[in-house]
Image (cartoon, rainbow, N blue to C red):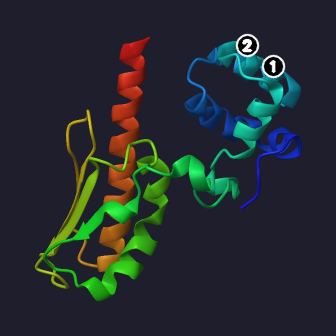
Amino acid sequence: MQPLTHQVWARHFTELRPHVFEEFPKLDRSQLEAAGDDWDRVVELVQQSTGMSADLVNARLGKLDVDELGLGTGQPDGDADEGRASLDQLRLGPGFTDAERDRVVDRLSKLNRRLRRFPADGTELLLTVKQRDTNAQHMTLECRVPKFAPFVATSGESDLRAALMEVREDLWRQIDDAVNKRKERAR
């Protein structure tokens, strides 16, 4: 993974705008769109909306995670993520063995970026599967985080890998939706 730079911005600014807006929700959407491929203007707009220094804005933008474009740190920020939720809180319930943990966590690892929004203390994840390896297989990924209603992602996929990807994407979407609704109410 690589950092977001002004060269990458110039080539992919249309695809990157939603990610920048997600990172800095106080930005004026129309001004961000008007900035086009002008990296310096984007930095200036973020500075105006957040009060951060240009260096800090550049650093935050450089760490923006956008899997589709291969952007981001590819890993947590070390000390900055200490005490933040991650798949370390995942418990494997019925239908899984402890020997499968590494493979399951690897398949769900994309969720770590969303889970970091929450404190590790009080965050719980439970993955279960019923009637495994049959056409009636049913997988459930439950996520409980402080100050939010529980998130529950399910899949009826009979293929275990496909089911893991489906619950991962569903949980990702549910977390994004809940966080965005909360941000909208706060405005």
Query: Which residue shows up at 48% across the image and 60% down it?
Result: 110
Question: 48 left or right of 185?
Answer: right
Q: Amino acid at mark 2?
A: Gln
Q: Secondary structure at mark 2?
A: helix
Q: Mark 2: give few (<14), some (14-19) or many (20+) Cα within 10 Å.
A: few
Q: Secondary structure at mark 1?
A: helix
Question: 14 left or right of 177?
Answer: right
Q: Quadrant of the C terminus?
A: top left
For marks 1 and 2, give the CA distance: 6 Å
Camera-nearest residue between 41 and 81: 81
Pointer 2 residue: 48
Query: Which residue shows up at 39% across the image and 42% down it?
Result: 118
Q: Amino acid at mark 1?
A: Glu
Q: Position of residue 4 (x, y in %)?
A: 77, 46
Q: Is 29 placed above or below 139 here?
A: above
Q: Are marks 1 and 2 in contact (CB under 8 Å)?
A: yes
Q: Position of residue 35 (x, y in %)?
A: 80, 21
Pointer 1 residue: 44
- Residue 111 visible: yes
Q: Mark 1: give few (<14), some (14-19) or many (20+) Cα within 10 Å.
A: some
Query: Which residue shows up at 76% across the image and 51% down it?
Result: 3
Camera-nearest residue between 142 and 122: 122
The image quadrant of residue 14 is top right
Q: Position of residue 25 (x, y in %)?
A: 56, 23
- Residue 38 visible: no
Query: Which residue shows up at 64% across the image and 14% down it?
Result: 28
Question: 134 left or right of 23?
Answer: left
